[in-house]
Image: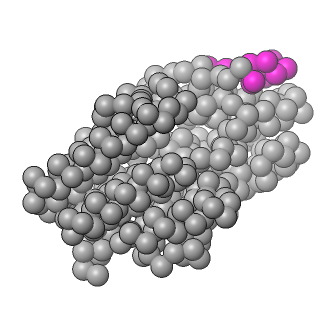
Amino acid sequence: MKVLLISHYPPPAGGIASWTKRLLSIGLPNGWNVAHINLNTINGRDPFKNPKRNFKDEYVRTKNIWKKEIQFLKEDKEISVVHTCIPCTPFGILRETVTGCIAKLYKKRFILHCRCTVPNVVNSFYKVMLFKMLAHFCDGIMVLNQKSVDFCKKNTSSYVELIPNFVTEDELTFAGNDKISTCVKNVVYVGGVTPEKGCDTILEAAKKLPDMTFHLVGIVSKEIADMERTPNVIFYGNCEKEKVKEIIPNGDVFLFLSRYWGEGFSNALVEGMAAGLPCIVTDWAANADMIEDKGGKVIPKQNVDALVEALVELSKNVDFRKKASVWNVEKVKKTYVADVVLKQYTEFYEKILRT
């Protein structure tokens, strides 16, 4: 059995591309093989190096994607499923509608993998209509969070299933509650240091919590660099993975306060959970699904007072932090490691093939 996966592959290492690299390096279980169309290397516009759309270049690039799909489906008779990844932008929806039509012409099952929080992106009448048109050709839709499940079930008749991102165990540093300190001194964030990721909220909260040190790991945007920064905020810049694995376990709390419109599921949050850190997250994308009410605190986005209150409360409540630490580590081991999630992908394919 074989699936044709249509997705980005590094470089550059965006979210979908990094996911693809991990999947292809490990492979799928249960006798499934993968053929892959790398959207980054097909002739035409590179969407990362040149984000500005040019109609002619986009037409060439898109046409070549479809040609490559047809070539695979003509030549490789083992392929039974076409699995395409999409951030649900309007142009992407239109492109994948044709991708789905091609899959149907060759009598293949077509699976749409929404790599975002769908209602945050498909957020107008005409976008919903486009999405419904695409869903008409789908045999199944994979999503990353409950908000997307609810949206897809409301607006389509396709089979929908929540399957989270996965991480490999060598990307993680597992820890337990033996490292819990008597109070919160070190607060960690990993990701793009931008306003959209909530780092403006972190800098404002740091002004009110001088006894805590805030460690921000990632490329710093101009907007954040230009903000007033107190001495208890440390910018690390872009770090190698091994350095990140050193920094996270030395924290007492992990923050993920994203309000980024394209957010679907945070691997950085998984890393914080695996390290045994209680987490404070915004009610955005998959964040609340991930920590529920046991792994930390969920707060509104862009709310400095709520962040300060949550940090103070966690600092005082050592018992809760110990329980949250253990719960987060177990949640990652049971839910987000590769062995668990890759099996869910193949079970999804097999379920679709049986219908």
Left or right of 2 in this view: 341: right
152 or 145, which is in the foreground?
152
Question: Is residue 270 visible to us here?
Answer: no
Left or right of 280 in this view: 127: left
Q: Position of residue 86 (x, y in %)?
A: 45, 51
Q: What is the quadrant of the C terminus in the image? A: bottom left
Question: Is residue 72 visible to us here?
Answer: yes
As drawn, the residue found furthest toward the front would be: 56
- In the rendered image, the vertical position of residue 181 relative to residue 13, given as above or below: below
Q: Position of residue 247 (x, y in %)?
A: 56, 28
The colouring scheme, among rainbow, by chain, secondary structure or one colour, is one colour
Q: Quadrant of residue 78?
A: bottom left
Magenta extent: 223-236
- In the rendered image, the vertical position of residue 130 relative to residue 13, given as above or below: below
User: Is residue 228 covered in magenta?
Assistant: yes
User: Is residue 314 covered in magenta?
Assistant: no
Left or right of 162 in this view: 228: right
Residue at the location (20% across, 65% down)? Answer: 106
As drawn, the residue found furthest toward the bottom would be: 355
Q: What is the quadrant of the N terminus in the image? A: bottom left
16 or 212, which is in the foreground?
16
Q: Position of residue 26 (x, y in %)?
A: 25, 45
Residue at the location (73% across, 34% down)? Answer: 195
274 or 229, which is in the foreground?
229
Left or right of 221 in this view: 81: left
Residue at the location (70% across, 38% down)? Answer: 196
Q: Quadrant of residue 297?
A: bottom right
